[in-house]
Image: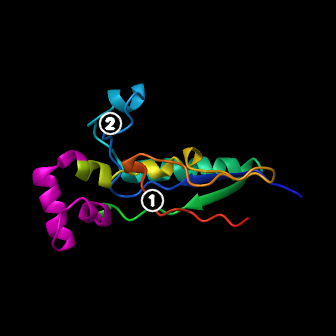
Amino acid sequence: MKSYEVNFDGLVGPTHNYGGLSFGNVASQSNSQQHSNPKEAALQGLQKMKALMDMGFVQGVLAPQERPDVAALRNLGFSGTDAQVIQQAARQAMPLLVASCSASSMWVAQRRHRQPERRHGRWPCAFHRRQPQLQIPP
């Protein structure tokens, strides 16, 4: 079976923030609550992807996920319209709102991979990396 190495990058969305959500990660903790620039981050990501393609790598791009993750907030007990759910979370549980806005799913290298000789199923992930489970065919 022939295999290819493909680099996938997730594109940063408009709610990108430095929430300090990766406990134990020095960079995450030291940059917590710093000002972020989602547009600049997305452009930097695209530049990196293009540079890899220019070097001959196969590059995949994953679109930003819908954020904030209102469905996750509803599952945690918030109710009402989307705007009401977001307002309630902001008043009652700001860390959950920050996590639901996280763009950390852009770190797809930590997400999953498939090799011809080995298949990985679902891997546990932190709440802020919550995303629809990818189904990888055999």
x then y, percent, for residue 109 = 59, 45
Q: Is residue 82 magenta?
A: yes
Query: Colour mode?
Result: rainbow
Q: Residue at x 42, y 55 (%)?
A: 130
Tell me if residue 78 comes above or below residue 37 in the rendering: below
Task: Answer with the quarter of the image where residue 74 lies.
Answer: bottom left
Q: Which SS class for mark 1?
A: loop
Coordinates of residue 53 in the picture (x, y in percent): 70, 53
Residue type at numbered disc 2:
Gly
Tell how many labels: 2
- The residue most toward the bottom is 81
The CA distance from mark 1 to mark 2 is 19 Å
Q: Residues within 10 Å of mark 2 (few under 14, many from 20)?
A: many
Extent of the magenta region? 70-95
Residue that badge 1 annotates: 131
Kindly identify which numbered label has been placed on residue 20.
2
Give the overall secondary structure of the magenta segment: helix
Residue 65 to residue 109: above or below = below
Q: Quadrant of the C terminus?
A: bottom right
Give residue 55's position: percent from left, percent from top.
Answer: 75, 47
Residue 111 left/right relative to 59: left
